[in-house]
Image (spheres, grey):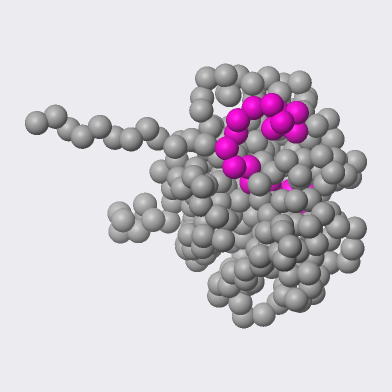
């Protein structure tokens, strides 16, 4: 009897910067895709000289070459979902936006990366407006943290879950895009993310997880957004209110396991392969 034929693999694309320390950016995205059983393709927008202590240098990839990478991948590979991370400059933002308008990339998760965990700036100030005005309305979900949401709205950073809810709903209303505002910067025993979908009235969901006391937080935002893209690739047509739960569970487990990696002496990485290590123990 012949063996059953496996279904075609689902594909997710990451458009982001490279982290030489391996904990964030393209590296975190591809590890997350693999952990979900999703094939990962990548378009590199910038190189960073980076470790667990910070970013020592950034070399942006020219916008024309970012566009060439995108066209080359999409001419050959069917992409079922896309995660967008660090874009560095306005010219790259506009190049990516042009592709989003003309090519099929599946559901698009935009992580508006502006500042690294270490506090180093990763987005040119001139690019913030391009992300807000041009790219954000083309995405299906945007995943800002508290200071990123404030920057996109031009307001003070939220200091409570109630303010996060107001800002998530306002950003969804302005952009027409679903918003997952990550509450990790707030205090409290629980980390509360706010999911707001545009509409009248807005559909808002609070996603709660116990706060993890750890310094292994490098790449947290990249990991959550790429987990959401992986979930979208695996479950086409499913709402973000459903997909956010398994994506957040994956992040929580990776955070809890990260301290055991003992990689670097600063903000260490998450353990994206925690399930594989547990299976082998």
x, y percent for residue 195: 65, 63
How far across and down, in percent of the image, does residue 38 sit? 45, 40
From what the image shows, is residue 240 above or below residue 58?
below
Query: In front: 258, or 75?
Result: 75
Residue 80 among magenta residues: no
Most extreme residue toward the front, as rendered? 200
Q: Is residue 227 visible?
A: no
**Residue drawn at point x = 60 percent, y = 30 percent:** 104
- Residue 172 falls in which quadrant of the image? bottom right
Q: Is residue 202 visible?
A: yes
Q: What are the residue bounds of the magenta stretch? A: 96-118
Q: Residue at x 60, y 33 (%)?
A: 105
Q: Residue at the location (81% across, 43% down)?
A: 131
Image quadrant for the N terminus?
Answer: top left
Q: Nearer the viewer, residue 201 or 34?
A: 201
**Near-viewer residue (275 or 90):** 90
Q: Position of residue 130 (x, y in %)?
A: 85, 40
Residue at left offset 33%, top offset 35%: 7
Magenta run includes residue 100: yes
Give residue 211's quadrant in the image.
Answer: bottom right
Residue 106: x percent and y percent? 57, 37
């Amino acid at each position: 009897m012949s063996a059953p034929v496996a279904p075609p693999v689902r594909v997710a694309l990451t458009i982001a910067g490279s982290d030489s320390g391996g904990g964030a950016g393209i590296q975190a995205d591809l590890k997350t895709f693999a952990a979900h059983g999703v094939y990962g393709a990548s378009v590199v927008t910038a190189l960073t000289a980076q470790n667990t202590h910070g970013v020592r240098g950034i070399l942006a990839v020219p916008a024309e070459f970012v566009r060439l990478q995108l066209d080359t991948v999409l001419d050959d590979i069917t992409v079922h979902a896309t995660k967008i991370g660090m874009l560095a400059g306005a010219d790259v933002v506009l190049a990516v936006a042009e592709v989003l308008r003309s090519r099929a990339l599946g559901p698009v998760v935009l992580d508006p990366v502006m500042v690294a965990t270490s506090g180093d700036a990763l987005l040119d100030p001139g690019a913030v407006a391009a992300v807000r005005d041009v790219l954000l309305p083309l995405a299906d979900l945007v995943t800002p943290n508290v200071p990123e949401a404030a920057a996109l709205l031009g307001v003070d950073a939220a200091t409570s879950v109630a303010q996060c809810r107001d800002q998530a709903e306002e950003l969804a209303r302005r952009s027409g895009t679903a918003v997952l505002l990550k509450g990790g910067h707030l205090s409290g025993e629980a980390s509360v993310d706010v999911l707001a979908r545009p509409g009248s009235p807005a559909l808002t969901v609070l996603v709660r997880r116990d706060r993890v006391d750890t310094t292994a937080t490098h790449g947290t935002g990249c990991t959550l957004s790429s987990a959401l893209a992986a979930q979208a690739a695996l479950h086409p047509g499913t709402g973000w209110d459903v997909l956010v739960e398994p994506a957040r569970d994956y992040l929580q487990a990776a955070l809890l396991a990260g301290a055991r990696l003992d990689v670097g002496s600063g903000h260490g990485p998450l353990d994206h392969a925690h399930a594989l290590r547990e299976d082998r123990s």
